[in-house]
Amino acid sequence: DVVMTQSPLSLPVTLGQPASISCRSNQSLVYSDGYNYLNWFQQRPGQSPRRLIYRVSVRDSGVPDRFSGSGSGTDFTLKISSVEGEDVGVYYCMQGTHWPPTFGQGTKVEIK
Amino acid sequence: EVQLVESGGGLAQPGGSLRLSCVTYGLGFSVFEMNWVRQTPGKGLEWISYISGSSATIYYADSVKGRFTISRDNAERSLYLQMNNLRAEDTAVYYCNAGGLRFFDHWGQGTPVTVSS
């Protein structure tokens, strides 16, 4: 199975400051159609996961534009340009290129 | 608005069975590929099963193969997971998910399963 490794696992941030989460895979996530099937999910406390971004950089409807995704191959990044209180939670990357789909271990974002 | 509502979780004894259900709203259910995903504090999020829109294609994670059965009823807009021969390590929150193996678009609120004597 493809192993997804996130860093850091804990990310204390100051309101209004940027935040960045790294996700690395142990195999390239470039599929035969040229796309990287890398998703980012947000899980707020007490809630189920919610997809924020799919195929590396495409934001879901309703997701604020302070969230952005980038990367290709084995290295990916989720950035929050200016952290707000509602961004507190755990963020997961997930690959859908290889079977079975696998998730990173999660990065907990909290306010300093 | 898309909603996925799971039910059927609870307490089961080792070796016992449970059947999870997921009814969907606001989704063209019959064309959506569906998954079950579970979450534990120790192992995080784990994909466990997939079913295509027509039920023609089904996959399972090795951890549940031979014990769990996924199914769907498109007329009822519902997804199911029959869980047999439950083990302590199956204790988790189980999520219904719509979107197939690559996208995982929509998630339910989850239903907790505890396997304990």
Image (spheres, grey):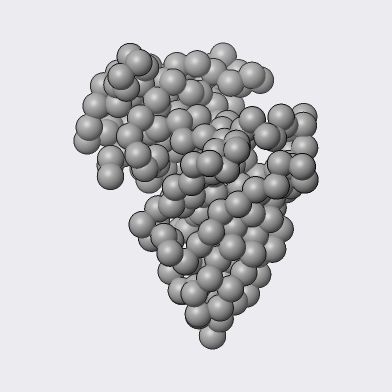
Identity of the residue drawn at 36% across and 42% down? A100
Residue A32 seen by the camera: yes
Identity of the residue drawn at 61% across and 47% down? B96
Residue A13 seen by the camera: no
Identity of the residue drawn at 43% across and 52% down? B60
Nearest the camera: A91 or A29? A29
Task: Report which quarter residue B63 is drawn in.
Answer: bottom left
Q: Tell me where residue A22 appears, x and y as whole percent.
A: 33, 29
Q: Tell me where residue B70 appears, x and y as whole percent.
A: 56, 54
Q: Is residue A58 above or below residue A107?
A: above
Nearest the camera: A92 or B7? B7
Q: How many marks?
A: 0
- Left or right of B104: which side holds A30? left
- Left or right of A25: which side holds A102? right
Q: Is residue B107 above or below residue A53?
A: below
Q: Is residue B80 above or below residue A111?
A: below
- Left or right of A73: which side holds B51? right
Q: Tell me where residue A95 appears, x and y as whole percent.
A: 38, 33
- Left or right of B90: which side holds B71? right
Furthest residue toward left: A26
Identity of the residue drawn at 64% across and 19% down? A61
Q: Tell me where residue A58 appears, x and y as whole percent.
A: 50, 16
Assign the N terminus of chain B to one quadrant of the image: top right
